[in-house]
Amino acid sequence: MSFLVSPGVHVKEIDLTNVVPAVDTTIGAIAGPFQKGPVSSIVTVTSEADLLNNFGKPNADNFEFWFTASNFLKYSNTLKIVRAESAILNAGESSGILVRDNDHYLTSFFSTTGDGQNTTNDWLSRSAGVLGNSVGVEVCPTAQSYSQDLGSNNLVNGAGAIGDKTITVDDADEAGFAFQVGDMIKFHEAFSVTKVVAGAVTASINLTVDGGSGTVAVGHRVIGDGITEIVKVKTVTSATVFVLDKPITVADNVVLAFSDYASIESGNTQYEVTSISGEVLSIRLKDDPDEGGLQTIIPDNALITRRWRYADLFDAPPTQSDFNKQNGRGTGDELHVVVFDTTGDITGFDVDVAGQRVNSVIETYANLSKNPAAKGPQGDSIYYPTVFFNQSAFVYWGDHIAAGTNWGTDTATAYTSVIPITTVSLTGGTDDYAVTAGELELAYDKFADAESVDVNLVLGGPSSGVTDTAAGQDTHVTMITSLVEGRKDCVGFVSPFRSATVGIANTTTQTENVTSAFELCPSSSYMVFDSSYKYIYDKYSDVYRFVPLNGDIAGLCANTDGVADPWFSPAGFNRGNVRGCIKLSYNPSAGERDQLYRFRVNPVVNFPGQGVVLFGDKTALSKPSAFDRINVRRLFLVLEKAIATASKFQLFEFNDEFTRAQFRNLVEPFLRDVQGRRGITDFKVVADATNNTGEVIDRNEFIGDIYIKPARSINFITLNFIATRTGVAFSEVGG
């Protein structure tokens, strides 16, 4: 503060309005083997559709993990997922390679200078797994690759009859003609013209030609190097004199050609090139599942228009970007890219031999640039590797196309003209759903740091059924227990291993299996055990499956937070109804429920006419304690997290009565609010000289003692029905 020299008033504000903040209580977490998605990194999903989009569909190998996640999302809208790393690879152009996530790609496979570091793969699938083997990429790098009108003096097909599926094309396999499998072609009538006799003409044009062949008619068009736009024949005055529909200027003896303005065949009949052998093109009628051939007779010397098979998806061929034009950079920098599904596994369409679609387009990118400095109208990069990194859901760029020798440079020189379309079918992607206990533990370890990762409900998915012989404990349950005990701010949920209840008809055996599964598992108030699996319909595979219940039990806690508060029990008929359950693998009787409860297992019961209900709210704590109830454990987690977060603002202040009073004024209103919402019955906050002694102050510490009387849930109801004699007052027998 400034010092006052003369009398005056100095104003100072002291903020005593701080409050304890609200904290999240419904964030779930799970790790497991999924079909696709980033590996060994945390991804947040908010719905089943989000789960499907990020991690793919469930299958016979991972459905227990997948539906545990999906079932949780029926109750909550926030779930953090880690895809476990096992023997999985991303598909590449020539081989598989593991790219875990975007950070891994940037550090290991992308160079900010513009050169790809992964020289073995021009393209890589975005996520690891065999699904990447369905990804194809086509790059159209020049206008010539996009389309060509191939003149009769360069490219001539032999005569074709109706139904023919092959044509012979002169120079089809020669450099400069970009024929390749997948090209779309159309035919045009052609008339050869050797020269223009009349020299330069500009108006009401009469062309006198030598050496013309065929019959020229109104509507035919003139093509040639001296003409930049389509010019049609207006009238025919004689066998060698033709009047055109607009002025042109041509030099004397310029070689021109006449072609039919309309296709030989009606409409825009197109054929797809299916294979190339020398000068023989195999063709089929476009979009014809029967793969029909020529629809009409094609005369010899007909002209061919070749178009890239995806040309119709773009407004114009790639040329020079506006950025390069405006900044005097190289020509020919633009390219178009199409990403497509080669097998139908991504889009759901099968190959066309079955009469269905193939090579279904899943992404298109127009007017990208080979120049790393190029920007779009909004100032965003249009450099194609960067665009793919930022936008594509299916592929990473790995390295420049080999023929593009100056791609990836900011130059005033024309960019290398790569005439053929570059087509890549990715391969080498592998799945591995048989994750080991160690691989799964490494995935769950991503949630270990409570300061950087906020989670409240940890889903175990399927238990391993693998016993640690040294301790006699299920290794999966032990792993989840270690995680939540280490964090001490969340609760873990696990189900018995599958074979404990699924496929076993005898409920006595099921009870013994479940109690044995959990008997020697660690004692922890941060864990919750359930009793069974539920039967559901898997619409993605059209089968019925048994899946673990722990996703639902964790979901009931999240749902309770929405309809009440975390300190209410998630069990019972008010808040414990399990959703989407056809039947249970194990429906314990009252006596069996007694046994389960003694072993810290919460029964899930199907009550006829009342639904499937969580009928217990115990934690996995072995000793009698207030913390052997889910609601009490979660009450303290909320109190601890909220008050600890608010207390951070006391750090580095003085440990004096002013700071202590601030702390009490912060905590006590919060606890009164919780008390008013039935979470606690009474409390006391001590932060004064009695617990902040001189020794404590000298150690730079501050101590706040908070005494809590938690509210308890009702687990047992006793109803006494007392019969009395007529004439006896109730006060005489009941008090």
Image (cartoon, rainbow, N blue to C red):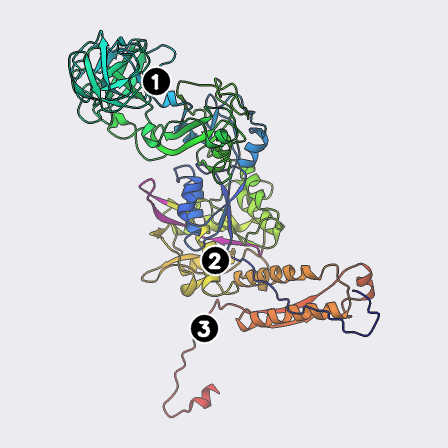
Q: Is residue 467 above or below residue 314?
A: below
Residue range (magenta): 525-545
Residue 131 showing in the rendered view:
yes
Kind of residue at badge 3: Thr
The furthest residue to the bottom: 727
94, 724: nearer the viewer = 94
| Percent x, y of residue 251 | 33, 13
User: Image check: 627 left or right of 257?
Assistant: right
**Which comes sooner in the sequence, label 3 or label 1?**
1
Identify the residue at image location x=19%, y=18%.
294
Residue at 39 percent across and 33 percent down: it is 364
Q: Amino acid at mark 2?
A: Ala
Kindly report the secondary structure that dominates the magenta region of the rendered protein: strand
The percent coordinates of residue 310 (x first, y second) are 34, 28
Q: Is residue 89 visible?
A: no
How packed mark 3 is, by other alpha carbons closer than 10 Å (few <14, some 14-19, many 20 or more), is: few
Please name the amino acid that badge 1 sits on: Gln
The alpha-carbon separation of the residues under discs 1 and 2 comes to: 57 Å
Residue designated by label 3: 718
Give the spatial CA distance, label 3 vs label 2.
30 Å
> Which circle marks residue 558 in the picture?
2
Query: Residue 574: which disc?
Result: none
- The answer to whether 575 is drawn above or below residue 220 in the figure is below
Residue 529 magenta-drawn? yes
Q: Which residue is mark 1?
A: 180
